[in-house]
Image (cartoon, rainbow, N blue to C red):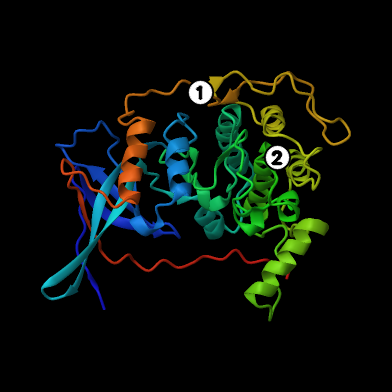
Amino acid sequence: MSQLLPHSVPGYIIERPLGEGTAGVVYKARPTAHSSHPLPSNVAIKVIPRSKVREAVRREVALHLTLRHPNIARLYHVAPVNLRTQRHSHSTASQLALALVMDYASPGDMFNEVASAAALPAPLLRRRLRHICQALHHLHSNNIVHLDLKLENVVISNSSTAQLIDFGCARRIDEHRHPSLPVQVSGTLHYLPPELLDNPALPPATSSDAWSLGVLAYTALSGIYPFNGARRGFSEEQTDAATRRRIRNAPPHRIPSHIHVPSDLRTIIDGLLDKNPATRITIPQVIQILDNSMPLSNNTVIAPNPCANQQLPQHKHHLLNRPPSPASCADADFSDSHCIQSVDEALYVVDDVQSNRLRQTQQPTLRHLPSRAHDHIVLVDRAC
């Protein structure tokens, strides 16, 4: 069996692995004193082996590098690295990989936050939803949809700011798919809207992110997935099939009776989990509901409310009789002092890795430690 060697990335000190996904491993790191890049004191580095650097990674890098918003984790730059594995006592093998240097959030993500607390209290959930909505509004205003919004893809910073991560499924709203390409459903089953289950070839739409936000809000408030089809004795295939049927045809599971659901959050969840995308409420409408139920603190960073001129369907929503207040963090100016790589430069690096080329002027190396065991925390469906 291969022995994995200690790891290093020139310009960074790798401290520990944070987690492992289908694309690669994410590490916590910090820039060295001699680093040529002006970066925060801690960063996250996602390492993707060359075998997994495909068109989706190229698209993720191109989209993520252009985003500047306090509720979106920054991608600072990408670099080629060598993964070296010791096979025998005197021989090593290496493969080229791609390193993505991003913002680091120390407390973790919303999935762990919900799993450890069973459910989030309403005031904290409102704060999380406001931050997520600001991030989504920024994306949608730039004709981008995330398409994989879920608890695991919202990280929490030291200042308790929620930030959106993982743009591997993101698409431009005006993106056209070539007819010869296979149709694939992007995202995570529990969060997929019914219209994408019925027709995966639908063009990217902001209503898909709205549905996923509804699932996230429901799950964070109750600790259960709204359309979970799991039953005792079911195989994974049976559970997935039952979940798809519930998403298409059934109402959400009943929230446990001991959990109080405030009227504003019920309005948001019911409106977002509308199975008809044409009548589903929008992200700006969610912001307006939150603004009418959640007064801003004196030190909140504010910007113009993106939904000030949008009217909510009166048969679905009851709003307080006061003008909407500005939404926190919406499209606030964000410093480009950490902008250290252009999209063209980044894509050149991605193409080099994909083509198995490492330019002689760059010889970064990643020596790979075995990642720690990570328990997979499962949200229990109490309705079962």
Residue 78 left/right relative to 10: right
Q: Mark 2 highlights which residue? A: 207
Look at 35% across and 44% down and name the residue there: 350
Amino acid type of the residue that numbered disc 2 sits on in the rendered structure? Ser
Q: Are marks 1 and 2 in contact (CB under 8 Å)?
A: no
Q: Residue furthest left?
A: 90
Q: Residue furthest bottom?
A: 233
Q: Position of residue 309 (x, y in %)?
A: 73, 18
Mark 2, other Cα within 10 Å: few <14 / some 14–19 / many ≥20: many
With respect to residue 186, does 131 lie above or below?
above
- Between discs 1 and 2, the one toward the N terminus: 2
Using the rendered view, name the quadrant where residue 95 is placed. bottom left
Query: Mark number for residue 120?
Result: none
Query: Mark number for residue 301?
Result: 1
The reply to whether residue 303 is visible in this rendering is yes
Look at 76% across and 44% down and name the residue there: 266
Mark 1, other Cα within 10 Å: few <14 / some 14–19 / many ≥20: few
Residue 290 left/right relative to 157: right
Along the line of sight, which residue is nearer the eye, 90 or 206? 90
Along the line of sight, which residue is nearer the eye, 263 or 332? 332
Along the line of sight, which residue is nearer the eye, 42 or 189? 189
Q: Position of residue 370 (x, y in %)?
A: 29, 67
Q: CA distance from mark 1 to mark 2?
A: 27 Å
Residue 281 left/right relative to 180: right
Q: Quadrant of the C terminus?
A: bottom right
